[in-house]
Image: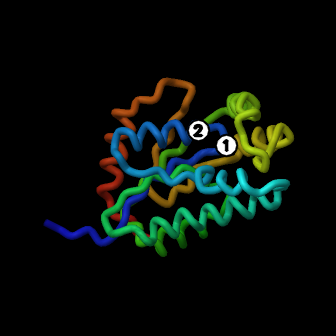
């Protein structure tokens, strides 16, 4: 039996309100792989720190992103994580650095594609559920523009899913298991 020397990650990527968290949770339920979510790490700070503005929210986001990769780096070889984040808020080179630093040897990206109108509607509908410190209604025009230009990171094999149709988790799971068999070459 071969001894695994690296880690495996499934990057669930997409702009805000694209369905990442729902997909990550469904995948975790099916696989028992833990989910590391940018918001799950950042939100406890937003619950405790008052008066968080957009600039400080971005700083918390960057620190949360770094925390995710520190957790992956500290995990034992052979561990698989599902990482739920909008990876495009940071440079692709930083993700590449974190993948190398964390000794990730196998990876797959699920790109959650969404139309600008659907993203705006979903974001608007969830405004009352977001903690203070997250961008509010004023972010929607920026989100609409982001939806038009956002794209996957493409550092690993990637699969595009659209949440306008029912998600076929059997197909997604089959694709992920095949993609994770490949070694990443950086």
The residue singled out by tag 2 in the image is: 113
Figure check: 22 above or below 150:
above
**Residue 109 x, y percent position in the rendering:** 47, 51
Q: Residue at x 45, y 58 (%)?
A: 156
- Percent of width and height locating residue 74: 43, 71
Assess whether mark 2 and mark 1 are in contact (beta carbons under 8 angstroms): no
Residue 174 sits above or below residue 109 on the image: above
The disc, 1 or 2, on the residue closer to the chain's N-terminal end is 1
Which quadrant is the N terminus positioned in?
Answer: bottom left
How crowded is the residue under tag 2: few (<14 C-alpha within 10 Å), some, or many (20+)? many
Q: Can residue 157 be seen here?
A: no
Horizontal arrangement in the rendering, residue 180 relative to residue 121 (left or right): left
Q: At x 60% / y 69%, what residue is drawn?
A: 94
| Disc 2 secondary structure class | strand
SS assignment at label 1: loop
In-image side of 13 versus 171 (left or right) = right
Which numbered circle lies on residue 16?
A: 1
Is residue 79 positioned above or below 31 on the image? Answer: below
The structure residue drawn at horizontal position 54% and vertical position 33%, both measured from the top left corner, is 162
């Amino acid at each position: 039996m071969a001894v695994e020397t690296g880690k495996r990650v499934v990057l669930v990527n997409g702009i805000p309100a694209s369905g990442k968290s729902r997909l990550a949770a469904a995948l975790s339920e099916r696989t028992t792989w833990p989910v590391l979510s940018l918001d799950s790490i950042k939100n406890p700070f937003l619950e405790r720190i008052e008066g968080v503005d957009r600039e400080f929210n971005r700083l918390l986001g960057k620190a949360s992103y770094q925390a995710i990769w520190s957790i992956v780096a500290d995990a034992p070889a052979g561990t698989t994580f599902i990482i739920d984040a909008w990876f495009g808020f940071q440079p692709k080179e930083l993700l590449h650095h974190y993948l190398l630093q964390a000794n990730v040897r196998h990876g797959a990206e699920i790109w959650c594609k969404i139309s600008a109108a659907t993203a705006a509607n979903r974001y608007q509908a969830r405004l009352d559920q977001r903690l203070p410190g997250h961008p509010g209604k004023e972010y929607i025009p920026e989100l609409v523009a982001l939806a038009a230009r956002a794209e996957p990171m493409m550092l690993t094999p990637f699969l595009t899913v659209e949440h306008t149709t029912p998600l076929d988790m059997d197909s997604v799971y089959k694709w992920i298991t095949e993609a994770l068999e490949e070694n990443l070459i950086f």
